[in-house]
Image (tube, grey):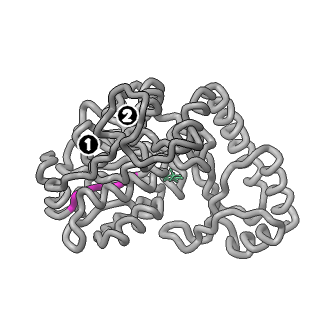
Amino acid sequence: MNLEKLVRPNIKALKPYSSAREEFSGQAEVFLDANENPFNAPYNRYPDPMQLKLKTKIGALKNITPEKIFLGNGSDEPIDLIFRAFCEPGVDNMVTIDPTYGMYQVAADINNVEVRKVKLNEDFGFSAQKLLDTANLYTKVIFVCSPNNPTANLLDKAEIVKLLAEFDGLVVVDEAYIDFSPESSLLSELDQYENLIVLQTLSKAWGMAGIRLGMAFANSEIIRIFNKIKYPYNINMLTQQKALELLDNLQEKDEWVKIILEERDLMIKKLFSFPFVQVIYPSDANFILVKMHDARGIYEHLTDQGIIVRDRSKISLCDDCLRITIGSPKENKKLRKALKELI
Ligand SMILES: *Cc1c(COP(=O)(O)O)cnc(C)c1O
């Protein structure tokens, strides 16, 4: 991979905005450099633009050095920055699997970048070769998601590694659900493959969707490009503080994951006995994809009861499928009780 050739010329030439807090990063007592208000501490101060404390903490958890970490306003931010940094609007394209997470398409559309989709197999597996064959000279990035949303399955790691080894552009692996899966993260391959970008998030297993913190891990050259084009203070002080605090709850997070996986297996066992359930696809995540007779009717019955699931029946390969998030034991019981009324 030649990063110099992958990055858009205007981004390569860009002289980034330099914030006050960035220009002086030494020790000081009197801050008269940023036109802040001296009152209303601590909210009066701009937050650390590079989130060093938080990156150090995340780095310790993941065994990654801070210069290989980018933090964003959810995973949405690094997804958008990948297009803005590497894909020339109206010229370059990206390749991804179908069905998958909708934000890749939305971010590509916003940036006027063509999306080339390759359908998954009937068993929701994918072929690296098919993705490689769909790429052309203008393909800057391949997006895969493992475990995949909405199909819930892990993708074959050997196939992802084949993409990394054979594609000369960037390969993004979205691991939003990796904590729920039996497979290990591709973070271990970061030093091996300079074209790898791993996305993770605090929104799922860590239970922090509300504070908006997404993570991208990649070699430090790629991270430097993201840092150059991001909003200077993209992670606010409250999010940085709360994440630092809640990342201490590692054991609690693992306990939540354990309960959710037990509840998932219980849900699968119970749903099998419902006559309208046709297929429950294997899940490596905190949700299940279920094919049902009259999925739309069931969806509407559930919403009438105040229970919201995701209707995926219009998505490729997901005819008559609902995506059901595994909730608390009580919530899951309520769902089953509402479904029983349909028997
Ligand atoms: C939920 C989800 C995310 C997380 O997005 P955030 O913006 O970090 O909340 C990322 N990727 C996939 C595939 C998801 O399903």
Q: Residues within 10 Å of mark 1 (few under 14, many from 20)?
A: some
Q: Nearer the viewer, residue 220 or 169?
A: 220
Q: Nearer the viewer, residue 316 or 102?
A: 102
In the image, taking residue 62 as reference, residue 2 lies left or right, namely left
Position of the N terminus by quadrant: top left
- Residue pictured at 76% horizontal, 45% vertical: 328
| Gap between marks 2 and 1 measured at Cα | 18 Å
Quarter of the view holding residue 112? bottom left
* Residue type indicated by callout 2: Leu
Disc 1: which residue: 224
Q: Position of residue 302 (x, y in %)?
A: 78, 67
In the image, taking residue 100 as reference, residue 162 lies left or right, namely left
Disc 2: which residue: 187
Secondary structure beneath disc 2? helix
Secondary structure beneath disc 1? helix
Earlier sequence position, callout 2 versus callout 1: 2
- Residue pictured at 81% horizontal, 62% vertical: 339
**Which stretch is magenta?**
139-144
Q: Which mark is residue 52?
A: none
In the image, residue 262 above or below residue 210: above
Q: Is residue 96 magenta?
A: no
In the image, taking residue 163 as reference, residue 258 lies left or right, namely right
Q: Position of residue 21 (x, y in %)?
A: 36, 40
Quarter of the view holding residue 106? bottom left
Q: Is residue 141 magenta?
A: yes
